[in-house]
Image: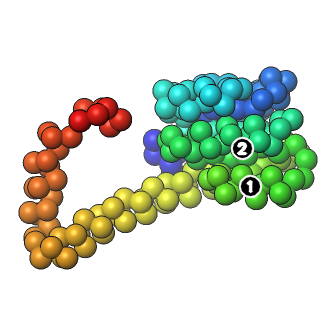
Amino acid sequence: MNYRDTEHLRVLIANERKDRLALVAPIVATLGHEVIAREIEIADVGAVTARERPDVALVGLGESSDHALGLIEKIVQEATCPVIVLIHARDPEFVKEASKRGVFAHISDADVEDWQSSIDIVLRRFAEYHDLEGAFGRRALIEHARTANRKLVDVATAVVDGHPLLPKHPHAPP
């Protein structure tokens, strides 16, 4: 996805309360986005995130902050999209815990008119984050070549030549 284009996003919404999911979905649609998944269960949200590959995820704080934090952790582990936490009342301690688990922002259902601006900012920061990850990866390769006193092209060739030796499924035993 081009993060400069924040129209018609594919949005995953997650909350342990079905009534909150039902309230959030029409707001997302009003913003011109598509709710591609509604998830309640912590055990299922990671797989849904991996399969659906949303552009952004909105995780609501329901009855249990532990449940919401579990949803956040599973989505962040997939690292396919930024997570925004949706709070219904001021809760600085929950926001602090959510930030430790990788959310990019929090929004309130009291400020629905600001949701799109927050989503725009989050998508830009997420794209910058991934650009930095790529730069650090390239830098590590350059440093490896420098430390080993080898040309970068030789190290890259070794990586490419070694690729067929890797398992086809990352979690499969060799």
Identify which residue, 1 or 150, lies in the foreground. 150
Q: Counting other residues with Cα less than 10 Å from the Cα at mark 1, is it few (<14), some (14-19), or many (20 or more)?
A: some
Q: Quadrant of residue 132?
A: bottom left
Residue under the point 78% across and 29% down: 16
Circle 2 — which element?
helix
Q: Is residue 78 visible?
A: yes
Residue 56 in percent (x, y) is at 60, 40
Tags 1 and 2 in contact by the CB under 8 Å rule? yes
Q: Is residue 85 above or below residue 29?
A: below
Position of the N terminus by quadrant:
top left
* Marker disc for residue 97: 1
Kind of residue at disc 1: Glu
Residue under the point 80% across and 23% down: 18
Q: Is residue 6 visible?
A: no
Residue 17 in percent (x, y) is at 82, 27
Q: Is residue 111 above or below residue 124?
A: above
Q: Counting other residues with Cα less than 10 Å from the Cα at mark 2, is it few (<14), some (14-19), or many (20 or more)?
A: many
Identify which residue, 136 or 2, lies in the foreground. 136
Kind of residue at disc 2: Leu
- Residue occupied by mark 2: 69
Residue 97 in percent (x, y) is at 74, 55
Circle 1 — which element?
helix
Residue under the point 56% across and 33% down: 46
Direction from residue 16 to residue 142 in the image, left or right: left
The span from disc 1 to disc 2 (Cα, nearest Å) is 8 Å
Residue under the point 29% across and 64% down: 138
Q: Which circle's residue, 1 or 2, is located before the other in the chain?
A: 2
Direction from residue 76 to residue 107 in the image, left or right: right
